[in-house]
Image (spheres, rainbow, N blue to C red):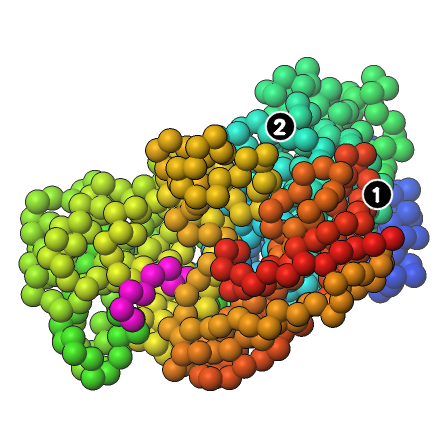
Amino acid sequence: MTKKIVRHTVALLLLMLSFSNIYAQKTTVQNIDSRVEALLAKMTLDEKIGQLNQVPGDISTGTDVSKDDLLSRIRSAKIGSVLSHTNFQNKITMQRVAVNETRLGIPLVFGFDVIHGYKTIFPIPLAQAASWDMGLIERIERIAAEEASADGQNWTFAPMVDVTHDPRWGRIMEGAGEDTYLNSRVAEARVRGFQGDDLAAKNTVAACTKHFAAYGFVEAGKEYNTVDMSEQRLRETVLPPFKAAADAGSATFMNAFNVLNGVPASMDKNLITNILRGEWAWKGMVVSDWNSFGETIVHGAAENESDASAKCLAAGSDMDMAGGTFQKGLKKALESGRVTQAQIDEAVRRVLRFKFSLGLFDDPFRYLNQKRHDETLEKPEFRAVAREAAAKSMVLLKNDGGLLPLTEGSRFKKIAIIGPYADSKGNKDYMSFWTLGLGVRDYDSTKVVRPAQALKPALEKLGYEVKVTEICLDATCTEKDYSVAINAAREADIVIACVGERGIDCGENRSVTNLELPREQERILSIIGRLSKPTVMVLFNSRPLVFDWANQNIPAILVAWQPGFETGNALADVLTGKVNPSGKLPVTFPRSLGQVPIYYNHLSTGRPQQYPGEVWTSGYLDAPTTPAYPFGFGLSYTTFSYSNLKLAKSQYKMGETVEVSITVTNTGGLAGEEVVQCYTRDLTADISRPVKELKAFEKIKLNAGESRVVNFRLTEKDLSYWNHELKWKADPGKFKVFVGGNSVDVKEGEFELVR
Ligand code: GLC
């Protein structure tokens, strides 16, 4: 017995000694590396491989971690991180086990998909991008970080910065659309919002820029599909938003599921080691996507877990999300000489450094404070920002005859609000797949202010009589539903038809082959149309949709996207004119799926079509080449004019800054915000260049009648591109510059770059 007591006492003393070393000092920039090295030196191979293992939380354990082996695996130091855990107490339990019941007491890091808010749900990211308001986007992520960190999350798997040209791809909702420049600015704003200026602060979370890389170019918009593209397009279109996020300090990156030119992204050494860590000198930690290490075997690019482990680790990937591939194969890879101890140590070093930088070694329970948890989540002021964001994201596509806004004293009296999304309580409607719980537990949809719930009282306050029709959800529509909707419309002076997509159909694993509105919705709209009633179509969507009949026949169309918690209030604010819509499309709306991919910054071709039907040109027999609505498009309740486009000079030496100015005037009767967009075209490069490229924008607010001169400064860097030798450079020669309120209606100027 005595021997046993002595042994335990010695073990306890050793543990306390090792524990005290780990937590003894406060982490500083000066000591972080030495502390990482000191800890690394103490670790066994199993402990090291355990730190590279990230395991799902609620998804695998439900609400009680003791119900499965999660705690025992933490206790045996086989887990370094847990993701998707929504239960606050469970996170405390798990951290206690990691810190107090393992040999070295290394804390866990908790990750979560905070994609458009954590507890307070904001508009989907694509909608936020439609606001073109970087300050607003940063404020949104600041709030998301406040809530997530208060609920024990240290790390969000965002921003998603995948440029895409394909609305069939469900994840188009997660990024900032088709343009590289806009995606880059949004990426920076999101990283700033999440991380603030101190990763170890209690109210910040680490960002995770994803998916590295080119996931947005899956063939046919099919989820998880193959990606094949030129190095030029990769450099020119795909990588800049990742570089912007890296430069903004994103602490981590995430692999993509797809192959890029045959190489699974998780084992793509060129991407991760040569570009991200080499050219960009980025020092952070790379986590796989969900089992993307293991999927290299399914891709047919690895033989087994050991081979997959070796290839992914050697490529520069560090942490294994949810797949257990490293647990199964990394030790074997080491023993067989496929990887070296130094390579394993380097990955573990990056994970430890990440945890030190979060302050987890100063206080492993820093993000698990019950008081802060209780007083932070869902603060009323967070909802106010959600309401502002939803209204600022909405895009007015049509407003024939000034039907909107619906104001007091209108000649119209009776309003019918109809359609499947007039007042839906459906699971995740007006939100997306990416709201808390990831399907583990449905979000409390009572927290969503539904359209009719807010719109009815808001319109009644203005003197309208409002009838909300029983709604049907698409395929469940019956003849009775139609007749009820038609009767309501027949009795009304104005119809507000709320149509679009289910919230649960937005996000990952939600690719579609048809962008049309569901047949039942088209039918209700066309029936209403035949009543020749003034109609407002409100679209709840997560991607560009096709609604040709509505475009031809409905006078007012508002893209509301999936607006989040404050859907109804924001919609009421916009439809009643309390908020003058200012959103601009971050992605082209096609006339038909047949036009896809269709995007504004396309190449000229040798035979650009000048008018519909022009023969022997790049076009179609059965459709125009122009979209239904172009990139950057959005109307206001007021109007803006553009004049006096000026360039300081007609010729600029290489290296000089090109100064562009334009006068914008609010020519309508209402104050409003306008996104002034500046595009260029390189007319004489050594490869073909896009007909337009967004280079700058500024969102301005003008009172009725007010004018303002807006200035843009274009540097040589702005005018550079990846040339045929894949060198990043600007060419001497002629350029066009375009400035306007969208990518089509622009004022045009020209200048020349000379050596
Ligand atoms: C998913 C997504 C990724 C997400 C991760 C964790 O499959 O591809 O974006 O962050 O798994 O949920």
User: Image quadrant of residue 461?
Assistant: bottom left
Question: What residue span does the magenta drawing correspond to?
Answer: 394-402
Left or right side of 465 for 305: right
Residue at the disc numbered 2: 228
Disc 2 or disc 1, which is closer to the eye? 2
The one of 200 and 335 positioned closer to us in this rendering: 200
Left or right side of 701 for 709: right
Q: Determine whether the residue tagged by mark 1 lies in a helix, strand or loop.
A: helix
Quadrant (top left/top right/bottom left/bottom right) for the N terminus: top right
The one of 243 and 696 positioned closer to us in this rendering: 696
Q: Residue at x 12, y 53 (%)?
A: 530
Based on the picture, tell me whether residue 398 belongs to the magenta stretch. Answer: yes
Q: Amino acid at mark 2?
A: Asp
Based on the picture, tell me whether residue 30 belongs to the magenta stretch. Answer: no
Left or right side of 379 for 275: right
Residue 73 position, x and y percent, is 65, 38
Count of residue discs: 2
Q: Residue at x 88, y 61 (%)?
A: 29
In the rendered image, the vertical position of residue 253 relative to residue 747, given as above or below:
above
Left or right side of 337 for 573: left
Residue 395 position, x and y percent, is 41, 62
Residue at the disc numbered 1: 279
Q: Residue at x 13, y 59 (%)?
A: 532
Q: Amino acid at mark 1?
A: Glu
User: Could you tell which of marks 2 and 1 lies nearer the N-terminus?
Assistant: 2
Within 10 Å of disc 1 (Cα), the crowding (few <14, some 14-19, many 20+) is few
The one of 201 and 718 positioned closer to us in this rendering: 718
Residue 5 position, x and y percent, is 81, 44
In the rendered image, the vertical position of residue 298 relative to residue 716, given as above or below:
above
Residue 424 position, x and y percent, is 26, 56
Q: Residue at x 16, y 75 (%)?
A: 412
The one of 738 and 22 positioned closer to us in this rendering: 738
